[in-house]
Image: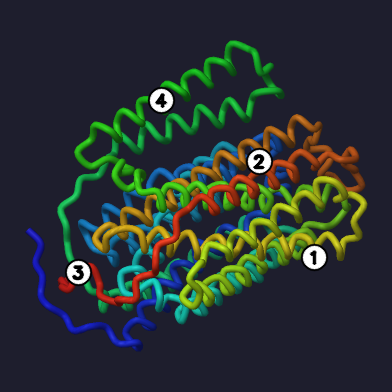
Amino acid sequence: MARSQTSAPLSHVDIRTIVIGVGVAMFLGALDQTIIAAALPAIAGDLGDFGAISWVASIYLLTATAVTPLYGKYSDIKGRRTALSLGVTVFVLGSIACALAPSMGWLIAARAIQGLGGGGLISLAQTIVADIVAPKERGKYQIYFASVFLLASLLGPTLGGFFTQHLHWTLIFWINVPLGAFAFFISNKALKRLPRHDRPHELDILGAVLLVAATVTLMLALHDGGTDYAWTSTRILGLFGASLALWLAFVWRIRRAPEPLIPVAILGNKVVSRATVAAACGMGAYIGLSIYLPVYFQAARGMSTSASGLGLIPLMVGTVVGATIAGQLMGRIVHYKRIPAIGLCVATLGALVLALWADALPLTAFEIVLALISIGLGTVLPTTTVAIQNAVELHQLGTATGAMNFFRQLGSAVTVAIFGALLNASGISEATLHAGATMPPGGFQPIFSATAIGFAVAFVFILWMKERPLRSSSRHAAEAIVAD
């Protein structure tokens, strides 16, 4: 049985201390998303398997996706501090395994372990902030998270490119060890002040296993189809059929389980479901683009590894700008979904420009378009998060936030696999990454077009999402604090 005791309301200083503490852990997860992109071509060349490049990114997203809802439930059982500490520890252990990888298969397995830890970092940070800050008040703390993502956006591509070209790509993983230790101690100390209320929950391990199996078989079909095997071959059709069967089993499980991985009641909430689809499509297109842009820079524009990392900065920084704008405006206007609607229009048009004229654009103009795309996409992230958290009961914050991140990461994992299939189908191979090699004209047009489609679908679901007045109460769902 849970033990509890009444605690006084948190002051602004208390809240700021907690936000900064979880912000350090969030930085660890955010940096990993930006530092690896520029190094992927070099990793593929070093370990000798360009065809598996999409798996290095996808497997992390896949395992992180599967455990994100579990972290939400686990934090309800053991407390946010314990759950976040566990996530940081597993993430660091996975990073060490990645740095020691002698082969692509080892690296992919190690990235899967890293994802098991990383799946809780950003989601738990968002949940903790939702615990202590009301939706209308959340904008004033946006500057802390904007600073985290801005720093990660600037340092990630720069460090990733520099380490890979001048030192060694393994340093992009070794750097997580000191950062992880710092994040562990800072967040662990800050979260001792977090109000807590334990609730009994069960972890749906079977649901997580079915989800991973369904997604892996789907990604295998997308990876091998059209390259190693024909799309109509027995192997590819069998993989698609197995994936469909596993997805149906997953649906059966969440409808029958006492406490399913993703609660059906929350998915039935029209704000949650539509905002989640918008976030999944928008973020999936963005992640897919950021993963493969270094390949485009190096193979189509002849840029070095370091230069390709720097070329990602407008795409990374723009999301912070867009998120900051949306975060500041949400609490001040009634029709807050107009912000991401406008942003997604800009992002879709920008992606269409790249699909039509990417090879003809000067590099400066290309980077400006990337910045506009990312600013537009950035407005979606805080808006959908706050709208979802505002639409559920306070005691459902952890589960709802976990569900949103679950589908957002699932969308990213599948999109990266689709982009990899499109890249392989266009004739891009490891040879195109060698110095002086050139990419066939229009080789990246399918990826830019798919990015535009993802943003357009997100736009439709944002328009379809219902607006509910933002809560102004800062009362925490649990008024008690329990010693860990």
Count residues near mark 4 (Cα–Cα under 10 Å), then give few for <14, some for 14-19, many for 20+.
Answer: many
x%, y% of residue 115? 46, 49
Q: Residue at x 75, y 60 (%)?
A: 370
Q: Residue at x 39, y 25 (%)?
A: 248
Q: Earlier in the sequence, mark 3 or mark 2?
A: 2
Q: Nearer the viewer, mark 1 or mark 2?
A: 1
Q: Position of residue 6 (x, y in %)?
A: 12, 78
Q: Distance from label 3 to label 4 (Cα)?
A: 37 Å
Q: The disc labelled 1 sits on which kind of residue?
A: Ile
Percent x, y of residue 452: 70, 47
Amino acid found under the numbered disc labelled 4: Leu
Residue 103 visible in the picture: no
* 263 vs 268, nearest the viewer: 268
Residue in the foreground of this view, choosing between 275 and 238: 275
Cα–Cα span, label 3 and label 2: 44 Å
Please report whichever mark, 1 or 2, sits nearer to the chain's N-terminal start: 2
Tag of residue 246: 4
Callout 2 crowding tier (Cα within 10 Å): few <14, some 14–19, many ≥20: many
Residue 320 falls left or right of residue 95: right
Tell me which residue sits at (51%, 50%) in the image.
464
Residue denoted by label 1: 368
**Residue 341 seen anywhere in this rendered image of the structure:** yes
Of label 3 and label 4, which has the lower sequence position?
A: 4
Kindly indicate the quadrant of the structure image that contains residue 173. bottom right
On screen, residue 18 above or below 13: above
Q: In the image, which is nearer the foreground, mark 3 or mark 4?
A: 3
The residue wearing badge 3 is: 478
